[in-house]
Amino acid sequence: MRNRKLGRTGLEVSQIGLGAWGIGADAWKGGTDADSLAAMSRAIELGVNFIDTAIVYGSGHSEKLVGQIKREHPELIIATKINPANWEWPAKDTTAADDAFSAAHVIARTEESLRNLGIDTIDVQQFHVWSDSWVGQGTWLEGIEQLKADGKIRFFGVSVNDCQPNSVLKLVESGLVDSVQVIYNIFDQAPEDNLFPACERNNVGVIVRVPLDEGALTGKVTPDTVFEEGDFRDTYFAGERKQQVWESVQKIAADLEVPLERLPEMALRFCLVPDAVSTVIPGMRSVRHVESNVAAGEAGPLSPAQVEKLRPHRWVHDWYH
């Protein structure tokens, strides 16, 4: 597994990391804790050294499972996220910073995450949403600086609002943030326009989430796919969306001249092309997914010719809201 630098942090993170939303066992159905633990263990065996979780994933359940693995593998780099106090996703520019992330809230939730994880220091603590109107407003920065001073976190990042990569540009240019986490994939190529260049200029690390568009880019979401009741994908792929996705991925595979079974590999390798990208964090809840995703990472970025074939497939669709 190749490593890349997470911006100016000095951390060397595996270019394929592990996104731990699915192991929270709330919004994603299927699988067990045993499956999740086995997947994380196998990922580490294959060179993955970066896991991203959040306090809201399963109301702390994901953090607890990640903490269990961390205790067995102290070298693991852990990132987690603080929910906004007002539970507002995405963040709105009209919301006061302290209504979402007051210093007291930032510190209290970080201490709760530390207890869930069973560790003394979080490598990267992130806000789960962001509004650039908060730069220079509120007490959130005091909370972050206090946590750093107390040795409870090492670095600070934000998870960028879904499908809004430009909503963090002011923060990136401010020099106050160490990393950003953003949706980027074959369909949503928008971060390339402004965010990635800004991150490179300011040496800010980039964590790519949703590289497979919640499963759309696996080629396994068909018009006949049925998700379990309560699985968030049942809403994400509602109505005619499964048909739209199915038609789109067929065209992608044809343009790349690969069988549909190789689409997940190609989708991950697409995300590794920009130099700005530090790590890509697909969700992995099974050993089989881990092994295939790590193999894709080892194959390296797509060629320039392959990337050009994917440019016409840019299709931003905010199906979260």
Image: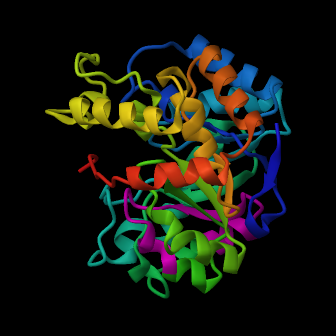
Where residue 82 sits: x, y (%)?
50, 54
Task: Name which residue lies at 59% across and 17% down.
Answer: 286
Where residue 1 sits: x, y (%)?
82, 36
Front one among 281 and 150:
281
Q: From this viewpoint, is residue 302 visible?
A: yes
Where residue 260 sits: x, y (%)?
47, 24
Q: Seen from this angle, which residue lies furthest bottom?
A: 136
Q: Seen from this angle, which residue lies furthest left?
A: 239
The colouring scheme, among rainbow, by chain, secondary structure or one colour, is rainbow
From what the image shows, is residue 311 above or below residue 254? below
Tell me, yes or no, whether the highlighted magenta stretch contains residue 100: no
Front one among 227 and 69:
227
From what the image shows, is residue 75 above or below residue 278? above
Span of residues in magenta: 144-169
Front one among 235 and 304:
304
Please state if 147 lies on the left or on the right of 76 as rendered: left
From what the image shows, is residue 277 above or below residue 39? below
Q: From this viewpoint, is residue 111 visible?
A: no
Front one among 18 and 114:
18
Task: Name which residue lies at 37% across and 30% down.
Answer: 250
**Residue 90's quadrant in the figure?**
bottom left
Where residue 44 sits: x, y (%)?
78, 28
Q: How many marks?
A: 0
Task: Name which residue lies at 79% across and 39% down.
Answer: 76
Please state if 249 lies on the left or on the right of 257 as rendered: left
Task: Name which residue lies at 82% across and 56% down.
Answer: 11
**Residue 213's quadrant in the figure?**
top left
